[in-house]
Image (cartoon, rainbow, N blue to C red):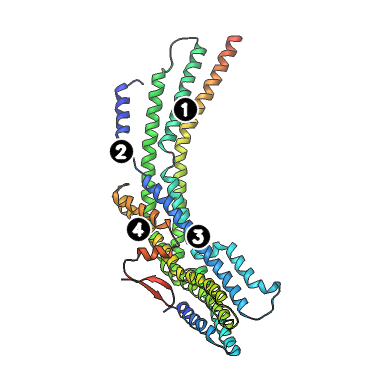
Amino acid sequence: MKHPLLSIFLFAFITGCVSTPTGNIEAFGVATVAVTDKLDTVITRYNEANINDILVEMAGKKDRYSVPSFNPLKKLLVANTDKNKYALYKANKALGLYAKSLTVLAKASSQDDIALAGANLTSALKSMNKQYKILKNTNEDLISDEKSGTLSRVISQISTFYIERKRGKALKEIITTTDPHIQTIGKTINDELLKGVIEGRLYTMKNIEMNALFLEYNKKINTTTYSQRKKALKKIYSVFIEMQSASATIAQAQKAISSVMKAHSKLNEALKKDRFSSKEIFRAIGDIATVHGDFNDLEELMQDCETEIVADDGKGIICKKN
Amino acid sequence: MSELEELNKTIIALSNLMPLIDDDDERSKIQTERDNLNQKSRDLADKTLREGIPELNSAIEALQATTKAANEAAESIDDIEEGLTTLGDAISKSAKAVGAIAKLTAIL
């Protein structure tokens, strides 16, 4: 390099710049993908419950059945494989893919990748110098090993600097543009689909199943022994717990989605001020990980409830709202 | 209360009644009514989950567009690193070619 002072200045300038810490965004993406995976299991359970609902209905009648009797089930199975037509599935999938894309963008061409490419460049320059000396039959370097190293380092640092600026700008644009949509999707999933549809249907379907078991129990009451009745009641009780858990499952799913919305909102606020890292972001992302850890737990709902646990006729055991 | 919520409440009320009725005919009538309502509830839930609401659908489309933009940004960043690697590879290849020419020149 002909101007050593310039190269030193350039190197110091670039290395001295604060790098964009995109680790939080990467962590947000990973935690959100885990939430959408869990929400997928709620959708799958709902589909299974629908199939069970039809079986319960069939068993409740004294009709005789053959293969065509299962046609209503076939319709449901087709719907399951064609999940892309369902708004809830599409919304959840869109959320998951978005989170994955943020993770990929946040870690695209990491400093390690650039360092490796820089090392390859150094080695290539050294090799070129060696070949030059052979060709010219001289001991004089075209480019010394030291200069090869410096040149590669400078190019790597410029690339890193450029990449980080480009990445930071892209992340800021994408997250700030997307935030209103994330809030809309999260709120609709929570209020309209999970609370408005799935919760009520899960509870109703389990209620039907449980009453079918009670009907059978009541009919046999005079012909069974105490042990047989106790065994039958235990079986009914397990369905009762499943029924009561319906609300807890949905409440946990809603909480997980809300934590994603909150963390995204924190990222949005911070990025508008060009801040890629803050304690609030860190805490909000940590909350996502904690919430999605245990998704389907009635006990958890009872422990977390800060108001009062009440039994609701249409929803089962719920945490009373303030 | 939404239509779905009303349907579910009625289904539950009828369902809770059924095990307590001794008369088979009467119970069968209630069961038929309950099953019809349950089918309606199932269909309504399915329709809502399938169609969503306009606000949600447009938000999904917008999210898909920004996801595409994020993927493209990641690809263009990867291209910079790839360019650096390609530069190293090109220099290595030309160095080898130069070496080969030097050897050939020495032989000739």
Task: Please tell me if label 4 and label 2 are on a single chain.
Answer: yes
Marks 3, 2: nearer the viewer: 3
Q: Which residue is tagged 4?
A: A262
- State the separation of the CA atoms marked 3 and 2: 39 Å
Image-based side of A152 in relation to A236, left or right: left
The mark found on residue A40 in the picture is: 3
Q: Which amino acid does label 1 sit on?
A: Asn
Q: Could you tell me if the residues under marks 3 and 2 are in contact, i.e. CB atoms within 8 Å?
A: no
Q: Is residue A138 visible?
A: yes
Q: In which quarter of the image is the N terminus of chain A?
A: top left
Residue at 51% in and 28% down: B89
Q: Are marks 1 and 4 on the same chain?
A: yes
First along the sequence among labels 1 and 4: 1
Q: Mark 1, mark 4: which one is toward the viewer?
A: 4
Compared to residue B96, the image places residue A246 above or below, namely below
Looking at the rendered structure, whether the residues under marks 3 and 2 are on a common chain is answered as yes
Give the labeled residue for mark 1. Answer: A120
Answer left or right for A229 relative to A254: right
Disc 4 packing (10 Å; few <14; some 14–19; many ≥20): many
Q: Is mark 1 in CB contact (under 8 Å) with mark 4?
A: no
Q: In terms of secondary structure, where does tag 4 sit?
A: helix
Is A322 situated above or below A44? below
